[in-house]
Image (cartoon, coloured by chain):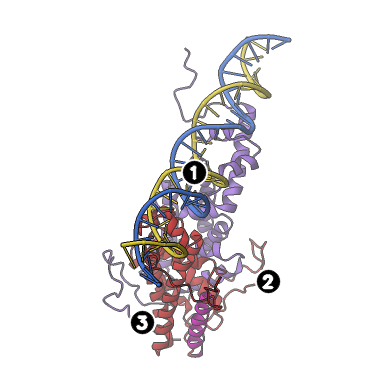
Chain colours: A red, B purple, C yellow, D blue
Amino acid sequence: MPAVDPPTPHARRRLRADAERNREAIIRAAGTVFAEQGGGVDVREIARRSGVGMGTLYRHFPTKGDLLTTVLEQEFISWITAAEEASAAIADPWQALTVFFEQSLAHLARNRALVEGCADVTGPFPQCARRRIDVMNSLRLRCQEAGLLRPDVTTDDLVLLSMSLSQAVQAAGSTAPWRRLLQISLDGLSSRNGDPLPDYGPAAETSDAQGPPGRVRPPVP
Amino acid sequence: MPAVDPPTPHARRRLRADAERNREAIIRAAGTVFAEQGGGVDVREIARRSGVGMGTLYRHFPTKGDLLTTVLEQEFISWITAAEEASAAIADPWQALTVFFEQSLAHLARNRALVEGCADVTGPFPQCARRRIDVMNSLRLRCQEAGLLRPDVTTDDLVLLSMSLSQAVQAAGSTAPWRRLLQISLDGLSSRNGDPLPDYGPAAETSDAQGPPGRVRPPVP
DNA sequence: GATCAAACGGAGCAACCGCTCCGCTTGTGT
DNA sequence: ACACAAGCGGAGCGGTTGCTCCGTTTGATC
């Protein structure tokens, strides 16, 4: 038997023309359906929408999870790439941060599955998660070096904030309501608010009534 | 046939002793399981944990949804009642707002099903949702009359914020990370940030690249 | 055009889950 | 102690969903 596969396994074996067409139809349909209804949709729906039988779908993607991963990775990459470019193109650090959030949330607003996929940080896209952290980290540093962002905000804080806002974006149907929330959050991030944030603490799991009562700080208008 | 039921149907017919015991065991187990795993759990798991058969469970609660509603309503009420009392007992408006959020989120942090149930505002507890809105509205008014809360924040904004934060609370395992996020949000709500929030707009559905570019406002430290 | 591996489609399998049915058990009133 | 309605348990039904099996079709190659 001749060695059909070249020793480099990363190049997918050349597909027949119809197979290639079907594969892309599946990805396109899955992208739409996952975005509309989240990762929980029936696989039959995707097969139907892409005009393909179940057998075909499952030869291209041995598992529903594989299909979801493929689609989500594409969209994750296009999203994070746009974010990287925007943040690199904008000189003003604070504006870069603002545009990053607006753009991210506008993107996530239209994709339920992407929001779900971003929720677990240890998700199936470690390199994408890495890039997201890097972008946010660089934005944070730029803003803090310019003295615009309160100094004790961490990258983790920003990641958690973006996840929290992306849920709000799903809950609020239209565009406007979460824009207001974003404005409020960004104002809260501004170094105008000089007071220190509460500590992370060493995983104080069992503290419901926490020791130091969080020092309620009435604002000074 | 004698009329067994008194004409007042609101008093549930007297249950046999074991039936009463079972009913409460079911509610207790369901509360735990729903809180741990959300509303999606298998009913068999609840039956198992309460030491009861399926038939028993379904005689007491003709539907899984009924059970969920019963449990959630109890917890919703105990939560909102605590919030009402706290907010009435605290004189300082800003501290009342702060404590309201801290208490709410601490409560929601330990109950997945409650977070899910709060997500749909048109949920099965209109009177509870009403009370929640009333508490938030009164807190908002108190803070705004005292000049502590930026004047164009609406009650809807606060509701959306609390839903958004409660999702963050689920994502962040331990207590500390979302406390920081709450602090940031509260700072953003402070009237120290005088700039107007973006309009709600008449459901501008198709505006991705919005007309007025949102006026990026660099903070003034 | 002939050949055949590659690709296709969709009926159907297995597991899961909400809910029901019905024969058995038990608390309660006499 | 007895009778019996009220209550109980869990096997199983029907619907859904992820995935497979296999007979049929089709694009590439000569």
Q: Residues within 10 Å of mark 1 (few under 14, many from 20)?
A: some
Residue at mark 1 to residue at mark 3: CA–CA distance = 44 Å
Give above or below for B11 relative to A180. above
The chief SS type of the magenta part is helix
Task: Residue B178: give x, y in percent of width and height.
Answer: 55, 68
Q: Can residue A12 be seen?
A: yes
Q: Which residue is mark 2?
A: A202
Residue at mark 2 to residue at mark 3: CA–CA distance = 37 Å
Q: Residues within 10 Å of mark 3 (few under 14, many from 20)?
A: few
Asked which quadrant contains residue B60, the reply is top right
Contact (Cβ within 8 Å) of mark 1 with mark 2 = no
Q: Chain of mark 2?
A: A
Q: Which mark is residue A105?
A: none
Kind of residue at badge 3: Val
- In the depicted view, which residue is nearer to us: A47 or C17? A47
Q: Which residue is mark 3?
A: B216
Q: Residue at x 58, y 46 (%)?
A: B31
Give above or below for B53 relative to A71. above
Q: Residue at x 63, y 61 (%)?
A: A208
Task: Residue B47: give x, y in percent of width and height.
Answer: 61, 39
Task: Residue A126: give x, y in percent of width and height.
Answer: 55, 74
Kind of residue at badge 2: Pro
In magenta segment, residue B49: no
- In the depicted view, which residue is nearer to us: D30 or D22? D30
Q: Which of pointers 1 and 3 lies earlier in the amino acid sequence?
A: 1
Q: Which mark is residue B69?
A: 1
Range drawn in magenta: A128-145
